[in-house]
């Protein structure tokens, strides 16, 4: 399973749908997309990981890199994930404290809107 | 003798293959289904790290993976033969909690291995390093 990336704008927030495996081979494509979005002026991002089948530390590094980029513009990067196998990786590395992790895209957008 | 041994050229594209093979041998060795995800991820992390080190120091040398499932434990040894040393800190430092000092990916990888493998040992191997990980296995499948 390769990596599939799609993105669309909802309520002024850019939602990135990720499907497949994020590893040392495929993570550079996600990194490029996040950089392109930030360079295009999108600083409010939601990364939907509900269809991610595999995530390793390279993928975590890309998400952390994306977070740093949007924060440089006072932006945000929230995650959508309910899969225990993926959430476990965030817990092991302490990154549950760094990212807002939500149960659905609507919840992530609502949480971001309510903070404004 | 290892149950399965593989060597692969140090390219990121082959790490997935190594993960799949390791998971298949683990399943066949009787590692419980609930632990197979951990095997897959930890082996992937160790191989990713080896690929990174080889690409920097010795891109012509293959990464070696030995999978042994004959005994009560399923054991994986990932060996890099990088000349020039590998300054890996083991055990890994705890990942800082502050938002502004998030660990670099290499440190995250070690944290993942430490968090997932049931038992981890790192040993010097000439100029390189071997990461030995193991998980409990039941009766091997026929």
Image (cartoon, coloured by chain):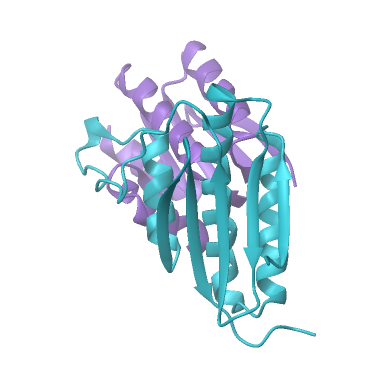
- Image quarter where the C terminus of chain B lies is bottom right
Q: Residue furthest left?
A: B98
Residue A49 appears anywhere in the view: no
Colour that chain B carries in the picture? cyan
**Which residue lies at the image location 59% right of the left edge and 41% below the top edge?**
A23
Residue B70 occupies quadrant? bottom right
Q: Quadrant of the N terminus of chain B?
A: bottom right
**Image colour assigned to chain A:** purple
In the rendered image, residue B82, in percent from the top left (x then y), is placed at 53, 32
The answer to whether residue A104 is above or below residue B57 is below
x and y percentages locating residue A59 in the rendered image: 51, 38
Residue in front for this viewpoint, A74 or A24: A24
The one of B94 and A14 positioned closer to us in this rendering: B94
Q: Is residue A109 left or right of residue A16?
A: left
Q: Residue at x 58, y 49 (%)?
A: B44
For residue B116, above or below residue B141: above
Q: Position of residue B65 (x, y in %)?
A: 64, 52
């Amino acid at each position: 399973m390769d990596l599939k990336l799609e993105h669309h704008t909802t309520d002024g927030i850019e939602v990135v749908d990720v499907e497949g495996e994020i590893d040392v081979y495929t993570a550079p494509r996600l990194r490029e997309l996040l950089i392109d979005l930030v360079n295009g002026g999108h600083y409010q991002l939601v990364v939907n990981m509900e269809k991610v089948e595999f995530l390793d530390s390279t993928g975590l590094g890309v998400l952390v890199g994306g977070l740093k980029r949007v924060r440089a513009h006072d932006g945000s990067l929230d995650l959508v994930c309910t899969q225990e196998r993926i959430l476990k990786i965030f817990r092991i590395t302490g990154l549950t404290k760094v990212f807002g992790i939500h149960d659905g895209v609507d919840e992530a957008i609502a949480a971001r809107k309510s903070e404004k | 003798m290892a149950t399965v041994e593989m060597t692969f050229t140090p390219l990121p594209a082959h790490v997935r293959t190594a993960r799949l093979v390791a998971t298949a041998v683990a399943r066949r060795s009787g590692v419980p289904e609930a632990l197979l995800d951990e095997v897959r991820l930890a082996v992937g992390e160790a191989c990713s790290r080896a690929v990174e080190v080889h690409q920097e120091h010795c891109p012509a040398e293959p990464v070696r993976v030995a999978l042994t499932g004959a005994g009560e434990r399923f054991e994986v040894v990932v060996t890099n033969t990088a000349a020039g040393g590998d300054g890996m800190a083991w055990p890994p430092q705890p990942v800082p909690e502050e938002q502004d000092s998030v660990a670099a990916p290499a440190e995250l990888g070690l944290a993942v291995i430490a968090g997932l493998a049931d038992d981890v040992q790192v040993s010097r191997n000439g100029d390189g390093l071997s990461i030995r990980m193991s998980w409990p296995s039941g009766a091997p499948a026929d």
